[in-house]
Image (spheres, grey):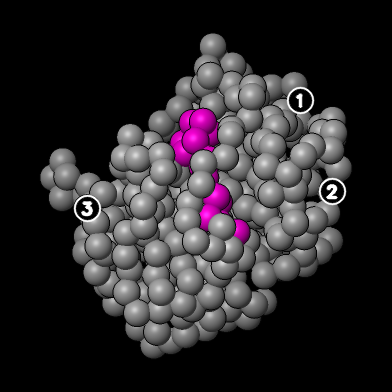
Amino acid sequence: MKKRTRAAILIGGMVTALAVASPALAAGTWTVINPPDPAGGAAELNSVFAASPTQAWAVGESRVAASGDNFNALIEEWNGSAWRIVPGANVGPITSTTPLYGVSGSGADDVWAVGQDSNTSTSLIEHWNGTSWSLVASPATEPPFGQLNTVSADSPTDAWAGGYAFPNSTITALIEHWNGTAWTVVPDAAASNTRIMSIAAVSPSDVWALGRERSGRVRSSIMEHWNGSQWSVVTLPAIGLLNSISAVSASDIWAVGEPGLIEHWDGTQWSQVANPAGATVNLFAVHALSADDVWTVSTDGMVTEQWNGTQWNSVPPAASIPAGFSEGGTEQGGPSLSGVPGGPLFAVGGNFGGGNNLATILEQPQP
């Protein structure tokens, strides 16, 4: 089911290790972190969620063996000073692909990680309760070959996940809801050939889902809104591909994409906002820390920008970003940029250059 978009990633098994903590840096300075690689192999990280200044989670995938096409879920945790690999839930025999594409939550003891389990041809859903990760059942009504790319929660009883399914050889958008007891499939408003790439849950009656629609060779973005009872399509102001969405409040939401697209929701409509980097950059992720502190990062990590409440300003990138760095790893979706007010702020991905496929993290200690 999964179509690989990157070079193979290597792993010998799941082990716990620590990355060397980075030294304190001045505000506005990015640094590159090489998180622990499973058994000295390699991996890629697709998504990150910062729950507090001393806890963050990054998820992705790693190759089960040096040869073959089987990939295992990878989960890494930040404890305030270093990253370590944490065992996820037992998904059964690691004889097929079980990657994780999205991670988010409502707090340190309520974190969701989502992806795909090709053992069962369904989505893969894991939950962290503050102590351990456990498997949570996908909806029985989920269409065949379901895959979840992104997840967002505004409380322990209200979480949303999005992706796509592949029934009858046709790609269809997939949106699922957690009510505190079980996940259910919720009909959406998108046309066929649509994948949900990013989702932002503001409240039980205010959720946004960003999708990517394909018609022939043409790809376009679609924005959907949940009003508490149904999904509907909302008009966007510019033509292009949006990759990520993040919300401050019901009247302050940001979305970014390509070519150089930055768009803002003010509670009434979406509008395009001037981008100092111009139209040549691919903005892959956005994360809103507050109304006057929003960040966006390009796919290659070489362009970072910050909203100060009035305008977007360019911020120098890390000095030693690997030449093969790509934010978000497989680019399936999910928030690959996340932080907390006052720091830290993380952007995750993989280094696909020079034949080395290594998980890579960019950090702002004090954004």
Residue 81 versus residue 318 in the image, above or below: below
Answer with left or right where residue 356 lies relative to residue 312.
right
Nearest to N terminus: mark 2 or mark 1: 1
Nearest to N terminus: mark 3 or mark 1: 1
Front residue of 35/88: it is 35
Q: Residue at x 76, y 30 (%)?
A: 36
Disc nearest the viewer among 2 and 1: 2
Instruction: Give the residues drawn in magenta, as a range.
Output: 293-307
**Magenta: predominant secondary structure element?**
strand
Under tag 3, what secondary structure? loop
Residue 345 position, x and y percent, is 68, 48
**How far is disc 3 from disc 2 in space, using C-alphas?**
40 Å
Task: Give yes or no for residue 295 being in the magenta stretch.
Answer: yes
Q: Residue at x 76, y 25 (%)?
A: 39
Mark 2 crowdedness (10 Å alpha carbons): few <14, some 14-19, many ≥20: few
Answer with left or right where residue 89 lies relative to residue 130.
left
Q: Which amino acid type is shown beneath numbered disc 3?
A: Ile
The answer to whether one can see residue 183 in this image is no
